[in-house]
């Protein structure tokens, strides 16, 4: 496992496998360390951060499953893993509610300028009551546009309605649900645009200079999906010009590196890819991964399967 884990999360692997754990404190195992252990491992539980490519697979002839304790699988070479007889699984259910909570929190923090106000008080600069100086934007009556309408998008919608937001949504496959809106119309009508799509060739830089130009002047952008979904240079330009009123980002194109130009923008909220991370969601996702590893080591097919190795490919690693 590329992270540390609570013993309860590893319970399905007791007397089944020897588990090598990543570091304590929230960090993950360096890639060099993973590559060092690769020749000996039958399974890997990652936190979604590990690039599983030809280099890693070439060094891991015994590998039978990579279980990702996250929703996204963009770091996994699914076709090559299937060809090598390696199962790929994820943990899609446990981060939905946590990510939706985060999204509303990020919207409120952004529109009410909470990070800047917090820094103002901490710096000892608050000397007197200042009516009007810190006024933000009321959510009620605004239009929230969701790009991506899977489980997370729908969970965000349920919360947003409670704040009085009108909700539109766009998905690559048109839905029959109330609020479905073509992308170009959603961008022009929304006061807040929130991204909830997986990273794939269609979504890479989905929010580019041209699409940002379609957004309302003063609108806000929230990204809780994957960093490369947004063209960050175009975003910086829009923030600098005032075309966008602000942005809340939990993910970045080259994370953990964030461009200096983006970090300089004051009308922003930045967090270190924590959107779906709660004590409960991490626990359940790791436990699910351990269960899937145990199933594979017992010769069974795991749950939450993201690829389909053939019987011939599977026989090569058994």
Image: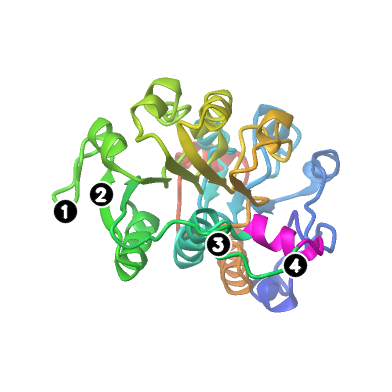
Name the disc covering residue 177, or none.
1
Q: Nearer the viewer, mark 4 or mark 1?
A: 4
Mark 2 secondary-structure assignment:
strand
**Which residue is denoted by mark 4 in the rendering?**
127
Mark 1 secondary-structure assignment:
loop
Q: Nearer the viewer, mark 4 or mark 2?
A: 4
Percent x, y of residue 232: 57, 29
Q: Residue at x 59, y 45 (%)?
A: 268
**Which residue is denoted by mark 2 in the rendering?**
168
Mark 3 secondary-structure assignment:
helix
Q: Is residue 72 above or below residue 212?
A: below
For label 1, count other residues whose C-alpha is less than 10 Å away and answer few (under 14), some (14-19) or many (20+). Answer: few
**Residue placed most toward the observer, 30 or 175:** 175
Residue interval drawn in magenta: 115-125
Looking at the image, is mark 4 or mark 2 earlier in the sequence? 4
61 with respect to 217 (left or right): right
**Which residue is denoted by mark 3 in the rendering?**
292
**Residue placed most toward the observer, 187 or 240:** 240
Quote the CA–CA distance across marks 3 and 1: 34 Å
Say whether residue 307 is visible: no
Check residue 118 for magenta coloring.
Answer: yes
Q: Nearer the viewer, mark 2 or mark 3?
A: 2
Q: Quadrant of residue 121?
A: bottom right
Quote the CA–CA distance across marks 4 and 1: 50 Å
């Amino acid at each position: 496992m590329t992270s540390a884990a609570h013993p309860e999360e590893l319970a399905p692997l007791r007397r089944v496998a020897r588990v090598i754990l990543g570091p304590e404190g929230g960090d993950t195992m360096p890639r060099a360390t993973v590559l060092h252990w690769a020749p000996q491992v039958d399974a890997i539980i990652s936190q979604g951060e590990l690039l599983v490519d030809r280099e890693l697979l070439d060094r891991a002839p015994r590998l039978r499953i990579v279980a990702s304790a996250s929703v996204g699988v963009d770091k996994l070479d699914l076709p090559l893993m299937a060809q090598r007889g390696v199962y790929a699984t994820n943990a899609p259910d446990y981060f939905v509610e946590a990510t939706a909570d985060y999204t509303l929190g990020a919207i409120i923090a952004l529109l009410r300028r909470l990070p800047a106000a917090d820094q103002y008080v901490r710096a000892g600069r608050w000397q007197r009551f200042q009516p009007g100086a810190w006024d933000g934007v009321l959510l009620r009556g605004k239009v929230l546009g969701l790009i991506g309408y899977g489980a997370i998008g729908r969970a965000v919608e349920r919360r947003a309605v409670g704040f009085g937001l009108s909700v539109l949504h766009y998905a690559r496959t048109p839905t029959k649900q109330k609020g479905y809106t073509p992308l170009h119309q959603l961008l022009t009508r929304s006061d807040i645009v929130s991204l909830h799509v997986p990273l794939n060739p269609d979504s890479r830089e989905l929010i580019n200079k041209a699409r940002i130009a379609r957004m309302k002047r003063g609108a806000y952008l929230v990204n809780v999906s994957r960093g490369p979904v947004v063209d960050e240079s175009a975003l910086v330009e829009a923030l600098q010009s005032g075309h966008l009123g602000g942005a809340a980002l939990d993910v970045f194109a080259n994370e953990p590196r964030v461009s200096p130009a983006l970090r300089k923008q004051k009308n922003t909220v930045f967090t270190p890819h924590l959107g779906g991370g709660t004590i409960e969601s991490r626990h359940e996702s790791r436990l699910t991964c351990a269960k899937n590893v145990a199933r594979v080591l017992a010769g069974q097919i795991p749950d939450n399967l993201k690829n389909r190795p053939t019987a011939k490919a599977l026989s090569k690693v058994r």
